[in-house]
Image (tube, helix red, strand yellow):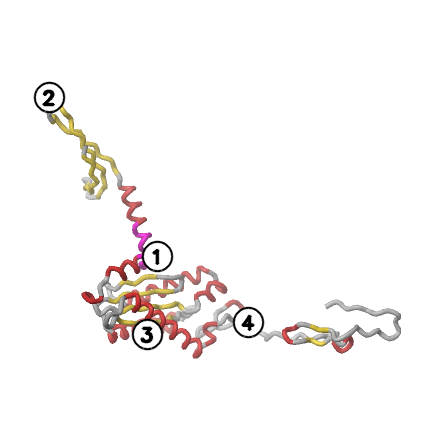
Amino acid sequence: MVELETEMMRKDGSSVWVELVATPLENEKGELGGIIESFRDITSRKEAEKKLLYLSLHDPLTGLYNRAYFEEEMARLNPQRQGPISILVMDLDGLKIVNDTLGHQAGDELLRTAARLIRRCLRKEDCLARIGGDEFAAILVKTGTSAAQEICQRIRQAVEDYNQKEKPLIPLSLSIGMATTEGSLSLNEVFKQADNNMYREKLLARKQHPQRHRPSPHGRPRGPGFRHQGTHRPPRRIGNPYGPKTGIRREPYGQPQAPGPIPRHRGSGYTRSHSF
């Protein structure tokens, strides 16, 4: 018996996957007298397998490769034969604030926008993946330091142009780190260098523009392009209204402390207690 899976064409030109089972028939003398062939349509199964394979290698939100595929590419590539190889690590700034204040749908849309912009700035042969919640990485084969720096600048310019042209409710901001294979450095070591360079850029941006990384009143992130709705009053300093009468003073961090017994009120034969 022979079992075979193959793709065949229908009369209308569409394709169909079939499972072919061929069973030999023997005559009375034990000789091959014929073959019984049976065909079974397995197109649905093949489509499900194809979908599972796609999901195992791609991020369902952005359509980019996922971390599993990225790590396979890191293990497959050889810097000695395919070098120089540059790696970009990019982090979407302020995603947690957006998720907490505007909801995860707004955060998902921000991730999809970032993925589209980065993809347009790369070549078709470059491997771009979403390797974390707010982190992207790209492997650039046959790309030296100067060419990789140009690509980084291209991405930054694309982000700036998007914010200026579209004027989105949520301005896009990316921190980018880059490193290139040099000498005997492995791709894992190059990735660590790019990751460290990305965090260095993120920390520098926080010092220069701290308002972009802090939550703001009315549930809106701070930064260019945002206008707070309504008026915002600074919180009032709440004093201790009973301090002058009771002698209770407010210590730092808002913890009241009573230095002694509560004084007796004049003209009353009892001591009144106060609740705070």
Which of the two discs, 3 and 2, labels the residue nearer the N terminus?
Answer: 2
Magenta range is 53-68
Q: Which mark is residue 195?
A: none
Badge 1 is on which residue? 59
- Looking at the rendered structure, the secondary structure element under dot 4 is loop
Mark 1 vs mark 3, CA separation in Å: 25 Å
Secondary structure of the residue carrying numbered label 1: loop
Q: Nearer the viewer, mark 4 or mark 3?
A: 3
Q: Nearer the viewer, residue 162 or 221?
A: 221
Could you say which quadrant of the image residue 134 lies in?
bottom left
Between the residue at mark 4 and the residue at mark 3, the CA separation in whole angstroms equals: 33 Å
Q: Earlier in the sequence, mark 2 or mark 4?
A: 2
Q: Is residue 9 left or right of residue 103?
A: left
Q: What's the CA distance linking mark 2 and mark 4?
A: 97 Å
Describe residue 106's horizontal placement relative to residue 177 as left or right. Answer: right
Residue 114 horizontal/vertical position (percent):
36, 66
Identity, as a three-letter code, of the amino acid under mark 1:
Asp
SS type, badge 3? helix
